Image: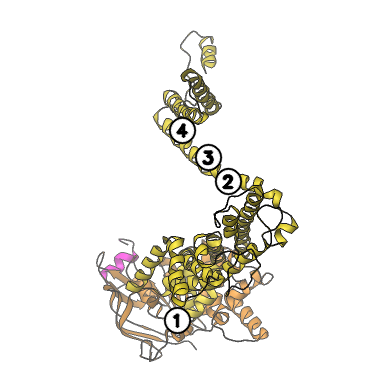
Amino acid sequence: MSTASSALSTAPGGTAPPRVTSDLVGARLPKWAVYGSAVIGWAVAVGLKFLLDWTGWYTTFFTGALLFVITLTAWSFSVEGRRRAKDRFASTLIYTSFVCAIVPLVLILSYIAVKGLPLFSPDFFLRSMNGVTSREEGGGIYAALIGTLIIVGIATVIALPIGIFTAIYLVEYGRGKFARTVTFFVDVMTGVPSIVAGLFVYTFLLLGFGMRPFGAAGAIALAILMVPVSVRASEEMLKLVPRDLREASYALGVPKWRTILKVVLPTAMSGLITASLLAVARVAGETAPLILLVGYTARINFNPFSGDMATLPMMVWDQLGKRSGTTSNDFTEARAWGAALTLVLLVLILNVGARLLAKLFQPKAR
Amino acid sequence: MAKRIDVDDVNVYYSDFLAVEGASINIAPLSVTAFIGPSGCGKSTFLRILNRMHEVIPGGRVSGSVKLDGEDLYGTDVDPVNVRRTVGMVFQKANPFPTMSIYDNVIAGYKIAGTRKSKGELDDIVERSLKGANLWEEVKQRLTRPGAGLSGGQQQRLCIARAIAVEPSVLLMDEPCSALDPISTLAIEDLIGELKASYTIVIVTHNMQQAARVSDRTAFFNLAGVGQPGKLVEYDDTTKIFSNPTQKATEDYISGRFG
């Protein structure tokens, strides 16, 4: 800009040059300002580290981030003015929060993948831990994987109908005190810690009837945890169905129950599938109730109504030696990571599956 | 087929709020009646009590009598579902069912209600209804496509086809053209003229030219102020209302002095 104005000042005519400015154009920082500020910030931080003899790199990193924000905001304030400085400050904070949220997630996932992937082989999925001691390689997650699928499956069969029907009641029929009470208790149940749900089933079923731990007991506890999640999510999805559509159906002389069955549910189907699978994913990794109610066994037990069952979270717990109070070693730790990765993948598959199914059932425009 | 409607001294409430007070009206079969009036004057509410759609809104109730060919719509054993079968409705915003094809939208009244019909009968109903709604030529090649893919005006005509597919005696229209462009509006006004041959039609509109164009009789609703109930001020032949109204308020409204 300075070069432009100096060129203009030497223009022929001798009079003061007309200033090429506009009310619509404000002063802006150069495009590299963000990166420049970042470099300056961290350079100063590194300088400080050596100057003040800081030991760790964490302090340096966060000081750098702080200096970067201060530099950019101050620079922007001096050149661009108050409003843009605020904008830069807020944008920087938002991006920083985003990075802070995503970094741990990526670190955890990649760490599990790196540790768990070497274990993956057909054998790992097709063998149980029966007869495999902690001092040898081999064994697999077959029993634990099937156990998790069976227990979560039973929990789903119990919880989803209750959850979806409650949501239908709340959205379509619920008025007044009773509906408010139901909503209140659903909200309270959302916050119930999983071990409390486990303790509840433990007291009533295992202590009450003098039973040994078995798979379905764990499924009941998981169902208790799933119901509120399912109710809440399904309720939101049903509320999204426009009232117009219900009225259109009533106006055709269709009874309410058929309107719900043939108009509301199909329209909300895609959302209900997402809601349900997210509720399933929510409990797939639960461990606490399973410790009390299902126990763990190295043998293959696919009968959810009798005897201990293996599950993925419990297998991780067992392989790390926490169940028996022994120490872990390279073999058992590797198996624990393998089971953990399988669990993560299971939840991932559920989520991706939810999205695909939701897309399939979405109302189309053409 | 088409039936007459006699409303006598009706009050409409939403919970404790009195929305329409002391309205009486006699609507002849095979006629078009327009309801006009400023926003909030209760004309849509009054339209809804003619097929008990106000009951869909929590707290909606009615006192007085509404008779369809002499039969009380609010009698003790009357099923609102059957009332709505006889008195169809088209809404302000076109609302085809998004999960259904054009074909399924037209026969929705049968399909959702679970009435069994043979494929041949349904094909006939679809063709007859879409022709009745002046939409057949535009969509006959793509009956299996989703109804939501049509333009706004086509969607509204699809909704009319859906309403007449169940062969009602009376057709209520709640501002059917307010979201449409002039060409679609004209298409629907022409359609109203044709439908008059088979149905008793009641239409709510904010467009006074439209009321003057399509209706035989016009009812003017007004309200004294915010929070006050709406009242039926004047009901007469459309030509009389628009040329020589009896009430001062009607004249003020149609000449654009308020509202």
Residues behind callouts 1 and 3 on a single chain: no
The reply to whether discs 1 and 4 touch (Cβ–Cβ < 8 Å) is: no
Rendered image: mark on residue A308: none
Residue annotated with mark 2: A108
Quadrant of the rendered image containing residue B5: bottom left
What chain does badge 2 belong to? A
Residue annotated with mark 4: A88
Of the pair B161 and A256, the residue shown nearer to us: A256
| Range of magenta residues | B246-259
Residues behind callouts 3 and 2 on a single chain: yes
Q: Secondary structure at mark 2?
A: helix
Q: Secondary structure at mark 3?
A: helix
Q: CA distance from mark 1 to mark 3?
A: 68 Å
Q: Colour of chain B?
A: orange
Of the pair B177 and B150, the residue shown nearer to us: B150
Q: Residue at x 25, y 66 (%)?
A: B227
**Residue A155: % across, % down:** 54, 69
Residue annotated with mark 1: B31
User: Could one spot residue B157 in this view of the protein?
Assistant: no
Q: CA distance from mark 3 to mark 2?
A: 14 Å
From the viewer's perspective, is residue B64 above or below residue A288? below
| Nearest to N terminus: mark 3 or mark 2 | 3
Q: CA distance from mark 4 to mark 3?
A: 16 Å
Q: Nearer the viewer, mark 3 or mark 2?
A: 2
Residue annotated with mark 3: A99
